[in-house]
Amino acid sequence: MTHHAVSAPGHRGLHAWLTSDSPTSRLQARCVQVYLGWLGLARNPLAMLGLGIVVVLVLAAIFAPLLAPADPIAQDLTRRLQPPGAPGFVLGSDELGRDILSRLLYGARVTLYVVALVVVTAPVFGLIIGTVAGYAGGWVDTVLMRFTDVFLAFPRLVLALAFVAALGPGIGNAVLAIALTSWPPYARIARAETLTIRNSDFIAAIRLQGASPLRIVIGHVMPLCISSVIVRVTLDMAGIILTAAGLGFLGLGAQPPLPEWGAMISTGRQFILDQWWVATVPGLAIFTVSLGFNLLGDGLRDALDPRSGR
Amino acid sequence: MSLTGTTSGGRRAWLSSRSGILKGGRLLVSLAVTMLGLLLITFLIGRVMPIDPVLAVVGERATKEVYEATRAAMGLDDPLYIQFWNYITEVLRGDFGMSLLTSRPVIEDIARVFPATLELATVATFLGVAIGVPAGVVAAVNQGRWPDHLVRLLGLFGYSMPVFWLGLMGLLVFYGKLDWVAGPGRLDVFFEDVVPQVTGVILIDSLLAGDTEVFANALSHIVLPASVLGYYSLAYVSRMTRSFMLEQLAQEYVTTARVKGLSEARVIWRHALGNVMVPLITVIALSYANLLEGSVLTEIVFAWPGIGFYITNALLAADMSAVLGGTVVVGIVFIGLNLLSDVLYRFVDPRAR
């Protein structure tokens, strides 16, 4: 990546500060790195489209009460299964006369909730397992990686099904099941990264200064693994959304009357031949959001990870 | 050359290399550990479930003495490691307990439903490979032009679409509106149990019986779910084919082949694709394994009486033996397919031996 301007310190403003090739502080170095990554991402129109979709999802979730024309769980049995465009129902109504658009908007909250919870648990757990295994080596590595392989050897949805069966249906348990089945790839990635940096000089220098293994792993190994893990997380988000929707569709995720997109498709299934919109609309929402995360993930991978260039 | 001659010759070649034995041994050990881990997980899931298995047997109104006696008789008072040991030996004997839902041994149920899943996943993989490989090749040859973008877009859609929703949309359009294909299920009610069950795979059984009507009906039922499932296989296979092909097309032997005057079609489809076939076998085996997972949701949408349908129904009826038995079987098949892809790769690619 080339630098756009040779920085003349002081008077070129923010842009110069952000593209400096001789940063004067740690903060500046980090900011330059992020900014250059952002420039790489911004050049990719598909990635920006993905980012746009994700931003819309977040905004819809935050402002759902303001945007939604109706209460997502208010029923009106006299006006069941109204087609899209019927007065008062932009996207139609479902089998209990609830406004589908409002349920869609509130459903964005459920989707984000699931994604956010999985994203703050599974990668962290995987990161810890992977870096510890990679740094410690020996039997610790063998045991931890065997453990990881066992989880990898399962089809994800089936394992999640079995977990939910044991824990009972519900959105919390669905999140737990998804998190329990999605951490192994992160452990694999973190371990691979750790192996490449474990024997480098700067780690040896830190070790000579007397840093404890814990300090080395947390302070010096993990930060270097984070960017590959982030890329993988973004690429996995679509998978997380699809699995959560699948569990919801099977009736094992979010329970009624919570407006979850997968569960909405499940109820719409009974009316699929005559009132097609009840199942179609939430499916389109899932598809759009997954597509957004996939586009963004692809873009991030291209921008942050030059090795995996296509 | 006689058949026995080739196999023993092959085995000798395999055994003659020390690293072959080592790798084979390591593979077996890792397989055993993975299986053990699989059983440990299903065992623990069975233990933490909120349903009390004793209560299910003795009923709500049993006295404390009866409850305790039954509990002891069921072996639930033993230490966990003994219970785990018992569980392993039972599973190895093929004993997954009785299904509450069907009142039959779980293993019999699974043997009955598994061919349906196998049939669906096989036809789906076949479709995915038959379209995905050429699509990937065309994309790689036209890198950066519209065919490439089209294939990439198709793949991206596949990665983003919920399989159960795509199935519903397929039913809506091709069954509901256009009436091109038959609806949910494996056969029309009218055709059920017409042909004798030999393999459990209706497409094969009907051909064996020579009943073309049943075959046509079964085909019309399987086309839609297999296409839906096959689309996911296509997304994966085409993407991998494309990147393998790009790698090959950049190699020098491709230039050599062109320089010596071979036609472009021969260079691409014979020379480059020939070398791609090796890693592609791994990809196809993996995608076959992944279809097992996709088939759970597809089977629900199409009321396809396979293992996913079975597990889900058992789950909704809190039939834990059936759920865990099904999970173990799916897990074993999944591990088996992964192993198969690994072994195939080693056999086909001399460099990996």
Image (cartoon, coloured by chain):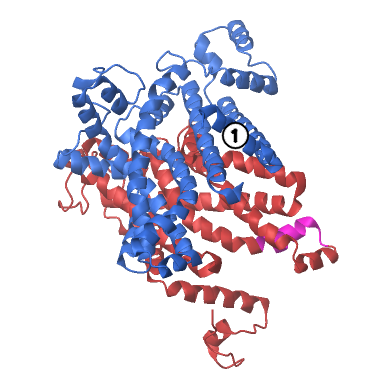
Q: Is residue B259 left or right of residue B72?
A: left
Q: Is residue A3 left or right of residue B76?
A: left
Stretch of the chain drawn in magenta: A211-223
Residue indicated by mark 1: B9
Q: Residue at x 52, y 64 (%)?
A: A308
Judge whether residue A219 is colored magenta.
Answer: yes
Q: Decide: is B213 above or below B25.
A: above
Q: Residue at x 74, y 66 (%)?
A: A200
User: Mainly helix, strand or loop, the magenta region?
Assistant: helix
Residue in the foreground of this view, choosing between A180 and B11: B11
Question: Residue B117, position in %: x, y?
Answer: 38, 31
- Chain letter for blue? B
Say which element carries label 1.
helix
Check the residue under mark 1 and report the chain it is in.
B
Location of residue A170 (image quadrant): top left
Question: Residue B206, position in %: x, y?
Answer: 26, 23
